[in-house]
Image: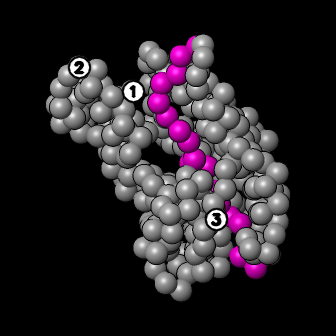
């Protein structure tokens, strides 16, 4: 049975991806996140008999992450690591001065993803065949918005990280790609929409409708839709799977954003 690590697995896209991947034969899902209670809830929703597991950990702590991956609890000697979904991240505004969240957002979104990939790489190398690393960036890596310089910078930086590691790792059999979601119906997005509603003195529903009205697809995405894209990038990693394998797509960013950016 092969392992796939998912960070930020306690909610949103990470949780939906865990539930999707856990349906596949031969896949052991490893849930990682900072909050234990949501992880336990996701773990309890996964099919029994898959040896799925969880660990509460902050991806910005590279030393702890590295130690855990090499330890007996992760058991990667018995269940080889063939994929990693570096999805953990935080959102929200920042402003220069006292209380600026710049360091926090960059540390978790950009440095945390870097830590995750680098700590996983030695374990990916031990698995034969093609392996996959997938990163959650954002449509905001494609254009800027006011008041969120840290978030936009962190998500844009992830695309540079993906391109660089794709050049380094693909010859060794590790494909590295990103997804760039637009609005997705997650807790983070709901908080953003509510903040915009509060600023305008309108309801959440009215604020959401404003955002959906400017999307060519006419609606925001669901976490389950994003999970299907990640599942596609992880094609062929289970035991005895017969579907087409994704073995040459690397260094790419999949723009799954309801048409809000068409570059």
Q: Is residue 193 above or below residue 147?
A: below
- 76, 88: nearer the viewer: 88
Q: Identify the residue shown where x is 48% and y is 61%.
A: 38
As measured in the structure, the alpha-carbon distance from the residue carrying label 1 to the one carrying label 3 is 37 Å
- Marks 1 and 3: which is nearer the front? 3
- The reply, left or right, for residue 131 in relation to residue 47 is right
As measured in the structure, the alpha-carbon distance from the residue carrying label 2 to the one carrying label 3 is 40 Å
Q: Is residue 36 visible?
A: yes
Mark sitting earlier along the chain (2/1)? 2
Residue at image mark 2: 200
Q: Quadrant of residue 218?
A: top left
Report the magenta residues as a range: 78-96
Q: Give the structural element (helix, strand or loop) at label 2.
A: helix
Q: Position of residue 228 (x, y in %)?
A: 42, 57
Q: Position of residue 36 (x, y in %)?
A: 56, 62
- Marks 2 and 1: which is nearer the front? 2
Q: Is residue 207 above or below residue 224?
A: above
Residue at image mark 1: 262
Residue at image mark 3: 55
Mark sitting earlier along the chain (2/3)? 3
- The reply, left or right, for residue 64 in relation to residue 57 is right
Q: Is residue 228 magenta?
A: no
Query: Crowding near pointer 1: few (<14 within 10 Å), some, many (20+)?
Result: few
Q: Is residue 97 above or below residue 10?
A: above
Q: Quadrant of residue 19?
A: bottom left
């Amino acid at each position: 049975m092969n392992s796939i690590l998912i960070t930020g697995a306690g909610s949103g896209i990470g949780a939906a991806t865990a539930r999707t991947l856990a349906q596949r034969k031969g896949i052991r899902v490893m849930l990682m996140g900072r909050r234990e209670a949501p992880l336990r809830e996701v773990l309890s929703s996964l099919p029994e008999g898959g040896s799925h597991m969880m660990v509460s950990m902050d991806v910005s702590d590279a030393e702890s992450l590295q130690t855990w991956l090499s330890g007996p609890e992760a058991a990667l000697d018995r269940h080889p690591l063939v994929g990693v979904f570096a999805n953990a991240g935080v959102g929200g505004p920042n402003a220069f001065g006292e209380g600026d969240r710049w360091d926090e957002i960059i540390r978790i979104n950009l440095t945390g993803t870097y830590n995750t990939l680098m700590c996983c790489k030695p374990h990916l190398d031990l698995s034969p065949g093609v392996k996959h690393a997938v990163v959650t960036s954002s449509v905001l890596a494609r254009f800027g918005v006011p008041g969120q310089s840290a978030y936009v910078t962190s998500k844009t930086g992830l695309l540079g990280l993906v391109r660089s590691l794709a050049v380094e790792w693909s010859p060794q059999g590790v494909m590295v790609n990103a997804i760039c979601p637009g609005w997705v119906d997650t807790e983070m997005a709901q908080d953003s929409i509510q903040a915009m509603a509060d600023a305008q003195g309108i309801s959440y529903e009215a604020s959401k409708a404003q955002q959906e009205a400017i999307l060519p697809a006419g609606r925001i995405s669901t976490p389950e839709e994003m999970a299907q894209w990640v599942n596609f990038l992880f094609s062929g990693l289970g035991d005895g799977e017969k579907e087409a394998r994704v073995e040459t797509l690397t260094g790419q960013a999949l723009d799954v954003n309801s048409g809000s950016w068409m570059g």
